[in-house]
Image (cartoon, coloured by chain):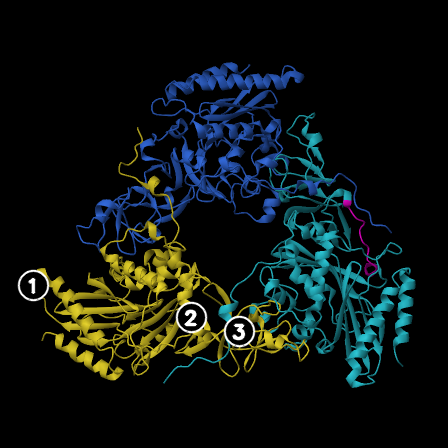
Chain colours: A blue, B cyan, C yellow
Amino acid sequence: MSISAPTGQFEGYFKRDVPAEDAHLTHTGPGTPMGEAMRRHWQPVCLSSQLKDLPVKVRILGEDLVALRTKSGQTALLHLHCCHRGASLEFGRITECGIVCCYHGWHYAIDGQLINAPAEPPDSPLLRKVRQGAYPTIERHGLVFAYLGAPDRQPAFPDYDTLNLLGVDLRPYALSHDCNWLQVHENLMDPLHAVFLHSRMGEIQLTEAWGEMPVTDWFEHGDRVCYLTARRIGDKVWLRFNEVGFPNFGQVAGFWEDGSEEKFFERVGATRWTVPIDDTHCWIFGLRHFSDELEAKGLGNPAQVGLEQLDIYGQTRHRSYEEMQRNTGDWEAEVSQRPIAVHALEHRGSSDRGVSLLRRHLARGIEQAPVPPPAVGEQVPTWTCNVVLHRPSENAEQDAASLLKLAHQIKDVVIAADSLPPAQRRREIEKQLEALSAR
Amino acid sequence: MSISAPTGQFEGYFKRDVPAEDAHLTHTGPGTPMGEAMRRHWQPVCLSSQLKDLPVKVRILGEDLVALRTKSGQTALLHLHCCHRGASLEFGRITECGIVCCYHGWHYAIDGQLINAPAEPPDSPLLRKVRQGAYPTIERHGLVFAYLGAPDRQPAFPDYDTLNLLGVDLRPYALSHDCNWLQVHENLMDPLHAVFLHSRMGEIQLTEAWGEMPVTDWFEHGDRVCYLTARRIGDKVWLRFNEVGFPNFGQVAGFWEDGSEEKFFERVGATRWTVPIDDTHCWIFGLRHFSDELEAKGLGNPAQVGLEQLDIYGQTRHRSYEEMQRNTGDWEAEVSQRPIAVHALEHRGSSDRGVSLLRRHLARGIEQAPVPPPAVGEQVPTWTCNVVLHRPSENAEQDAASLLKLAHQIKDVVIAADSLPPAQRRREIEKQLEALSAR
Amino acid sequence: MSISAPTGQFEGYFKRDVPAEDAHLTHTGPGTPMGEAMRRHWQPVCLSSQLKDLPVKVRILGEDLVALRTKSGQTALLHLHCCHRGASLEFGRITECGIVCCYHGWHYAIDGQLINAPAEPPDSPLLRKVRQGAYPTIERHGLVFAYLGAPDRQPAFPDYDTLNLLGVDLRPYALSHDCNWLQVHENLMDPLHAVFLHSRMGEIQLTEAWGEMPVTDWFEHGDRVCYLTARRIGDKVWLRFNEVGFPNFGQVAGFWEDGSEEKFFERVGATRWTVPIDDTHCWIFGLRHFSDELEAKGLGNPAQVGLEQLDIYGQTRHRSYEEMQRNTGDWEAEVSQRPIAVHALEHRGSSDRGVSLLRRHLARGIEQAPVPPPAVGEQVPTWTCNVVLHRPSENAEQDAASLLKLAHQIKDVVIAADSLPPAQRRREIEKQLEALSAR
């Protein structure tokens, strides 16, 4: 009996080389181009709820830091190692206005000023010249943001419109990932994965409607890269409009859409930032949005939103390996692309245009920061939304073209209203989108 | 009271340098000489029993791979990371004929052909030009073998005679080791360790007869390096003939021999391959042979043969550190030689000629592959055997010389029969060896 | 509502660089200047109590070694990997006079001599020329010391006076630290940390008196660097005199002093050596001293002294992270200075003069070893002590100057008696110190 090998064109031997990662976009340590770009924007660094009576060691953009809340309630972020002798401030004592190092009692204000060095003489020159590395922080909606860039370039804190909506309850969360930030962030501009990973692979992780293949397009506008997906759901069309903002901001429209009911400008399911810990680890810091409108089906659960947990399936590390194999989630689809995904090995197709566009946008943004839309009423307008219109198919063969045209009409309506005050803007958009519904 | 140090010639200070390992023989990653030599031979990569309904991540020769069994029953081995966007195929869905990536549904045949990319248009050029790295596999006796070399050099699968014996039950196993492959493999050409490690150190790990110091010789023949050990057991002589084949094949004669009963050509206790995972980890993949003859004493246990287990003492990592210290096995004797043993620090003696010979054989084989004996009836002849002859000692002083001469006579008988058909060959060898028994 | 960031001079961005460590003082592997300096002195390598019937793997100064006690009771220290084929001697069998390698039975004497290679012929040249790397050992007070330097420079074992006191019970201990040796050792010349870490941070880890800010001075004398602290305790003055000896020896005066009772030459709470495991791990090996005088308050506990335990708070890794944060000990204050503390980032003040002095002393000692005081009666004199004198404050404004002057008088008395025989020396010092008490 002869033992025969399978026939076929086996090319593993020729494809063994693993080239280097794209360091320009993926490396974010101090002094790297992408890291510096991130340092020019406010970044979440921990949850408010983590800051109780003890300091918290964090690592952000390759830097070891300590986050804390003073006894007077102010948040702070300082370099981890005391600039006296290097002992970690995670072992320090929190005071009314700062933190005291455990080792020799050096007392730092939240901006790093050395307030007291009790083993030194009162006239010590150290008190004038020593300053612990520190970064300014702002606490909003249960997230602690910090500005880790050059002081003379500190930007205003961008207060997005979606964080100011009546009737919306924001719940902060933080999900750690064992891989580079970019492959996590890119997932936001890859709407086709939802058809497969979240639907057709077996389990319905969101709603059945996600499994419909959409007409899709991507575009760049100002500091944003966006996708539009339009799905035919019977006589209705579900249009989903999602955005990411330079460098690592993103928004995702409501999760539970099924296209069954008309809606004209339903906003955001989650606002998030993909923040590098170091080059092979990152956080998703986010705000889950809960409202009667978003949660009409009762599928979300605010009690499951927080540190290393989210009420959306597959976003965390805390599932068994077998569950990850049988019902694969975003977490393992992203993390398993290697510690740093290797772009040179990819074969991207027309459905990956968003990923390619995002990478070009980031590369250009490193050279010259793109400009966001101007704030109106101190709120920065964003576009992410679900829209469901009544639009029966007129011509099956041309339905895809019609959906694409409609998607662009909707996009134009939404963006055109950027300069209106928030309340007026919403009314204007809803009015125009309602007019696009063919009843 | 003066405190005195022990006298003696303490030379630790002069022997502190740890030179580099012999990279030529020990490094096996893609492109290395030894790795390429291994890729020109079929290699076990996992157990059949590991391939159930989920894909299995494996690492072989420094390469990350996924092994699987299609729903139609065919085994397959592909590069781990999907060539679309890099998600790991360990999270893919097994199909009738291949595997679907979890992320965007790309469907690969077992040879890596892209069968479907459902988010791409049907006429996408990707479908013609994309191919996932893959390797052909053959499943035999509960082991999955793969050929990881250049397609135009793919050899026939070597069907060793010992894998085709009537009455022999083959049980597959896989034992991982935290060290380089070579120091595990060399143990096969080091028969003297058995006298000490397996016997005289305290516990009898096999039989008492192993503790007898044998007359030993080594030789090279074709693609093999072999040892001959001859032990005086009363009026009998136990001759053990073991072989390794280029580059990482090996066979071990039956384990439980005590030299008490005549036997003329008892074959193999285990057939095995030492397969690098990477340069500091390796597998022993093997087939334990069970037969009435081999297991006459009832010492073996097929139920203890499998993934990370073997019915021979000391072959696995799963014992306590104290047990490893008190009853040391092959596993820790091999692994503790450093992650990669340093040949430049060794002091080899006459009893280590087998190790030296094997290393020279490997180095020459890297340059020009040695030729195995031709297959007869599609079976490749192998030589490993236990022989016990009735041969009382005639002259105590010259007994060692007599044993050595006898060992070579037996070796010559075994090898001379290589070209006979298997059944005839066995009869011929047994007839001639029986004639060497002095009764 | 505008969102405003805190104002302040935040300089984290300008202080991100982490320079290299001071390799000259912190690196101690084979061939490094500091490592060679340490190898010229006897170093503890394990506890006597660790050496039972099994060999013990240890790592010292970046070298892998095996420590053992022969069946005849002699301690030994050999290179870990058998010089035959590299198997670890931690799996060897201990004999009357040495150790047998598990793999092939090579038998080494404690100086590494190859006594037997049983698989080799009796006249093998290996028996004359092979020698396992080994180091001489001396066992004292429950510690096993080894000399790891060049044989022709082997010094006498220094028998410190404090290890020969009547009524003092010495208890050995070993505490591992996950950081470089120097930042652990420096703590001994940093008396001010005790005011804060051990007292004012919250919990009283020793006695309340430690929280009093002392007048402090440091000086170098022979092979020692010392500190003097003088504390005003009501009408009394508590003078503490501690020393470190080149390169990594140190002594600490009794721990439980409260300054309430006159005493003139109370000696040592602990004698210790900070021994590198490798550049990012080290041991404190030490001897805790127990006597009726030292333990008058009953605060110490000999039953809590040993491997990874000490009866002084905060010296071990075995506390919860929360306990380390709430009641921080020496262990985490030292270890958290990074795996190797970065001197270039420090801002040392006048209270850190001891640390600076110690580093200069070490750097000079690497070039030319400093000379210890000559032994008298085979005992090397040491100076560490607590002294409590009756000395009411005469002038509050000048009390600090008086304390400093008194500290130097006491130091001069102690050192001047170095050349007297031990018993006479003690009487002389006590007599002169009693005369300094103003009653």
**For residue A232, above or below residue B170:** above
Residue position for label 3: C55
Q: Is A40 positioned to the left or the right of B427 in the image? A: left
- Disc with the residue nearer the chain's start (1 vs 2): 2
Q: Quadrant of residue B279?
A: bottom right
Task: Tell which of A159 and A121 is nearer to you.
Answer: A121
Q: Secondary structure at mark 3?
A: loop
Q: Which residues are magenta?
A: B153-163
**For residue B17, above or below residue A290:** below
Magenta region includes residue C330: no
Give how far across and how far down residue C135 sits, in percent. Answer: 48, 73
Three-letter amino acid code of the residue under disc 3: Pro
Give how far across and how far down residue C344 sits, in percent. Answer: 34, 50
Q: Quadrant of residue A97?
A: top left
Three-letter amino acid code of the residue under disc 2: Leu
Q: Secondary structure at mark 2?
A: loop
Q: Chain of mark 3?
A: C
Three-letter amino acid code of the residue under disc 1: Asn
Q: Report how far apart the C-alphas of labels 3 and 1 lie in the structure.
A: 63 Å
* Residue in view at x 24 percent, y 45 percent: A129
Residue position for label 2: C307
Instruction: Check chain identity for marks 3 and 1: say if they share one.
Output: yes
Instruction: Check chain identity for marks 1 and 2: say if they share one.
Output: yes
Task: Tell which of C65 and B347 is nearer to you.
Answer: B347
Q: Marks 3 and 2: which is nearer the front?
A: 3
Q: Chain of mark 1?
A: C
Task: Tell which of B247 and C48 is nearer to you.
Answer: B247
Tags 3 and 1 in contact by the CB under 8 Å rule? Answer: no
* Residue farthest along the left direction in this orientation: C395
Q: Chain of mark 2?
A: C
Magenta region includes residue B161: yes
